[in-house]
Image (cartoon, rainbow, N blue to C red):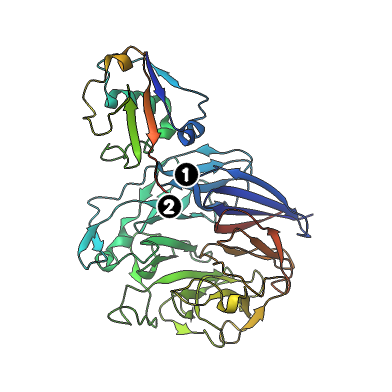
Amino acid sequence: MSAVRLLVGTRKGAFVLTADGKRDQWKIDGPHFAGWEIYHLKGSPVDPNRLYASQSSGWFGQMIQRSDDGGKTWEPVGNEFIYEGVPGTHQWYDGTQHPWEFKRIWHLEPSLTDPETVYAGAEDAALFRTGDGGKTWQELPGLRGAKGNLWQPGAGGMCLHTILLDPSQPNRMFVAISAAGAFRSDDAGQTWRPINRGLRSEMIPDPTADVGHCVHRIAMHSSRPGVLFMQKHWDVMRSENAGDSWNEVSGNLPSDFGFPIDVHAHEPETIYVVPIKSDSEHFPPDGKLRVYRSRTGGNEWEALTRGLPQSDCYVNVLRDAMCVDALDQCGIYFGTTGGQVYGSADAGDTWKPIVRDLPAVLSVEVQTLP
Amino acid sequence: MIRVALPFHLRNLAKIESEVELDLAGPVTQRAILDALEARYPMLRGTIRDHVTQKRRAFVRFFACEQDLSHDSPDAPLPDAVATGAEQFVVLGAMAGG
């Protein structure tokens, strides 16, 4: 029987949650790396027992951990993230230029074909790659050449938080950075260009600038990698042409501010977001935790509420904290800053808490296992 | 023999139960201790001092003989009591946060 394994990163460690294909009984394992911030964990698509985790601390810096047995045991691997060449500068809060400084890894994206190859998204924003299972990391500096001097940190830091690998074109990848925007490479990460046409951000001096947009997350369905969905700081967006242009699809959402966005495993036009009241408040509208689902690729949204708290709920759902499994009946999961991880085994129709009292959840990834 | 005490998280990271004992051939300095420590436990590289600048991380401190040596030169000789192993060289995470 199939099984699922959730990899949950929190402010105080990592947790591995497992269940069989029914997804009604869960085993909670952890905390791993207790007391450390675990921004993200992810498994290799070609070797599900090969996991990578980003472990960091304000005291002791960045570690990368690797597991070869599905998260039972871990070993630290390389943690040397050195910007290529002279790091240069980017925009700072006061309008001056500020040197690039490595702070942490926000996101790890294992290769679709090789368990030894992983991409890592850094703060201050840059893209790193390992080809030896995490022992050594090299920057792909062409990304910062895409008007990097104009990028600037958002309130959460200037982080590269999203990495999408195109399964149909091995040389194509997408990244998203707060607050710089979305970028695409068509040559395996050597050169990059901003793909932000159609975005409109009223909080920046030129609302339609090439770069400077606070993109919170982008998502794709593997069967249609040219169609991208974006949750921006405000606005939910859609692109039909691999990011060459974007159109707003916020439609009837109660708020188009939010962080995560994801796509149903088997229905490329079914997408999910979690509306948050505003960038000033960072909690759900009316104290009701609602996932919104569109079965039309945007614009027409329905609230999914069954099993979720519908009063007095003031948690947030962060950008890397929602995911979908690939079972026949698609499961969807998300974690909150209140430490709850919710799961739905029926594509969002009904929800149950898998665990309620973890530390604040930073990321949730799911592996669908044979 | 030098005795080095590490904070909880770094002991866990390096899978160390208690203090670390190091033998140094040359002068006993912060740099010599940290070089030897990182050679034995490579996973500690970057956790106590920056990979590139080799400067102490901001929230890491060095204590010995009831003195805060954090701002001393990394190449300054450490007290004899550290060099003889009578006193520990203590690496600790600064009390910070709330």
Name the amino acid type tagged 2.
Answer: Ile
Give the residue drawn at x 50%, y 23%. Answer: B18
The residue where tag 1 is placed is A64
Say the numbered circle drawn on residue B38.
none
Which percent across, then down, holds residue A82? 32, 46
Whether residue A47 can be seen here: no
Say the numbered circle drawn on residue A105.
2
Which percent across, then down, holds residue A228? 50, 75
Which percent across, then down, holds residue A198? 39, 83
Whether residue B3 can be seen here: yes
Which percent across, then down, holds residue A266? 67, 71
Q: Is residue B98 above or below residue B85?
A: below
Mark 2 vs 1: CB contact within 8 A: yes
Work out whether disc 2 and disc 1 sit on a shared chain.
yes
Q: Is residue A119 above or below residue A276?
A: above
Which chain is home to disc 2?
A
Give the alpha-carbon distance from disc 2 to disc 1, as whole Å. Answer: 9 Å
Left or right of residue A4: residue B52 = left
Q: Sequence order check: which comes first, mark 2 or mark 1?
A: 1
Which chain is home to disc 1?
A
Q: Report the front residue among A238 and B8.
A: B8
Query: Mark 1 Cα within 10 Å, few/some/many (few <14, many 20+)?
Result: many
Name the amino acid type tagged 1.
Answer: Ile
Q: Quadrant of the N terminus of chain A?
A: bottom right
Left or right of residue A129: residue B76 = left
Q: Is residue B18 above or below residue A316?
A: above
Query: Mark 2 Cα within 10 Å, few/some/many (few <14, many 20+)?
Result: many
Q: How many marks?
A: 2
Q: Report the front residue among A196 and A259.
A: A259
Q: Secondary structure at mark 2?
A: strand
